[in-house]
Image (cartoon, rainbow, N blue to C red):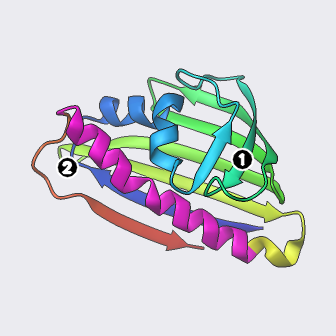
Amino acid sequence: MKTLTLEHFYPADPKDVWDLAIDLDAFHEIMGHMITFEGLPSGKIYKGQSIDVKTSLFGKLPKQAYHMEVVECDHDKMMFLSSERGSGVQKWQHHLTITPKDGGALLKDHIEIEANIKLLTPLFALWAKHIYEARHQPRLEILARNGLLNSEEPKQIVDLA
């Protein structure tokens, strides 16, 4: 198994960042340039939600089944935990938290990954690092478009364990 943690600072109200982080409709814009999703529901994620989709890298490669269970989703604590599998992944556990920090919000992604073929786990971890880093800029753009950013400079911290 491989674990990675990424932190991104958003110069915005933490509740606005939370609302964006759990918005499945925004997920298409945030991830659409790298992964397309067929069958992704609309709305906000919620505890107990089970999501089955077909994913395609860059919308070009063959679609593969992917499953996500929302194990926890606490709006007051601004955290969720999902358990995911599919597309060559045996385990993909994602714990997202948002905390107030320096007049903005710190979004922390903690991911545990294990591939179906154990030797591929480090490659899946590198891919995960790439896609979670790539979510930052589209989120900033959505927040800015909606007038939700303040003037602080965004920051990024990455920790590969």
As drawn, which residue projects farthest toward the front?
60
Instruction: Residue under label 1, please give it.
Output: 55
Question: Looking at this rendering, what residue extends furthest in the right direction?
Answer: 117
Q: Is residue 7 above or below residue 97?
A: below
Three-letter amino acid code of the residue under disc 2: Asp
Q: How many marks?
A: 2
Q: What main secondary structure does the magenta stretch of the protein show?
A: helix
Q: Nearer the viewer, residue 52 or 119?
A: 52
- Tell me where residue 76 appears, x and y as whole percent: 44, 23
Task: Point out which mark residue 155 bears.
Answer: none
Give the residue displayed 45% in from the left and 69% down from the top. 158
Q: Position of residue 91 (x, y in %)?
A: 80, 54
Q: Is residue 117 magenta?
A: no
Chain part drawn in magenta: 122-147
For discs 2 and 1, the disc positioned in front in the rendered view? 1
Q: In the shown orientation, is residue 40 left or right of residue 146? A: right
Q: Quadrant of residue 134?
A: bottom left
